[in-house]
């Protein structure tokens, strides 16, 4: 029998949903105000949830494990969520993610290794590997960001030209995969 969706309340959350709840609560209860962040609380709320949804879509397209994809995506910027900074956030975030996953006691060592590897390398957008979850993390992150108003201007201002070009290349790759137009790849 079908039961009502829990809306992330109660005792019936899956292991993935528990991790998603933990991350969202970390954002909501953060003591670090926007003034002391490179990001904002609202941005992290929107981007972590948006990236999870993109990750689910890409996992379906690529026949990957949706659960692993959503956990990677929800944790990918965990260092920036906690510390409000992006310098080396991928590598540093992998350590925080490992602790969260270990504390949950819901994941095998192999699963934790796959998840933390993807988080650790997600900033290397210019590198293409044969590791499906590493690529999914990069693709979900950059494509999600491209959908926001002003994303192109932000990237052009804050990223060196070669890095910007790599972002464009990756966004186009994802858009092609999803059957989306190759021009006007940023929201105006
Ligand atoms: Fe991100």
Image (cartoon, helix red, strand yellow):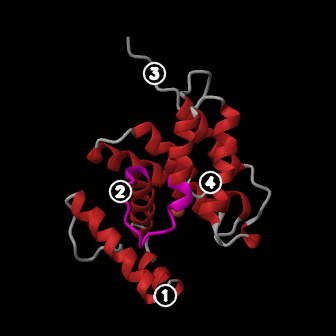
Tell me the tag on residue 160: 1
Queried whether the magenta region covers residue 126, the answer comes back as yes
The residue at 34%/69% (across/down) is 170
- Is 1 left or right of 13, judged from the image as shown? left
Residue 3 in the image, given as x and y percentages of width and height:
44, 17
Is the residue marked by circle 4 packed among few (<14), some (14-19), or many (20+) residues within 10 Å? many
Q: Say what secondary structure mark 2 lies in.
A: loop
- Mark 4 or mark 3, earlier in chain: 3
- Is 176 left or right of 143, judged from the image as shown? left
Q: CA distance from mark 3 to mark 2?
A: 39 Å
Q: Give the magenta part as a residue range.
A: 118-133
Q: Which residue is mark 4?
A: 94
Query: In this rendering, is residue 87 above or below 12?
Result: below
Q: CA distance from mark 3 to mark 1?
A: 48 Å
- Mark 2 or mark 4, earlier in chain: 4
- Do tag 2 and tag 4 residues touch (Cβ < 8 Å)? no
Q: Which residue is mark 2?
A: 130
Q: Quadrant of the N terminus?
A: top left
- Mark 4 or mark 1, earlier in chain: 4
Q: Which numbered disc, 2 or 4, marks the residue closer to the eye? A: 2
Can you tell me whether the CB of the residue at mark 4 lies under 8 Å from the nearest atom of ligand 1?
Answer: no
Q: Say what secondary structure mark 1 lies in.
A: loop
**From this viewpoint, is residue 188 visible?**
no
How many numbered marks are there? 4
């Amino acid at each position: 029998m079908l039961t009502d969706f829990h809306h992330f309340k109660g005792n019936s959350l899956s292991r993935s949903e528990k991790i998603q709840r933990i991350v969202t609560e970390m954002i909501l209860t953060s003591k670090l105000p926007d003034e002391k962040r490179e990001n904002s609380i609202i941005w992290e709320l929107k981007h972590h949830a948006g990236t999870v949804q993109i990750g689910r879509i890409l996992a379906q397209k690529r026949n990957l494990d949706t659960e692993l994809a959503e956990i990677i995506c929800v944790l990918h910027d965990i260092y920036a969520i906690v510390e409000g900074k992006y310098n080396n956030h991928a590598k540093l975030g992998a350590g925080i993610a490992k602790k969260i996953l270990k504390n949950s006691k819901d994941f095998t060592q192999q699963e934790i290794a796959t998840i933390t590897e993807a988080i650790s390398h997600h900033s290397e957008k210019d590198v293409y590997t044969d590791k499906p979850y590493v690529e999914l993390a990069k693709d979900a992150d950059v494509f999600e960001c491209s959908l926001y108003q002003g994303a192109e201007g932000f990237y052009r201002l804050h990223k060196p030209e070669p890095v910007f070009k790599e972002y464009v290349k990756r966004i186009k790759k994802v858009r092609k995969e999803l059957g989306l137009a190759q021009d006007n790849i940023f929201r105006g």
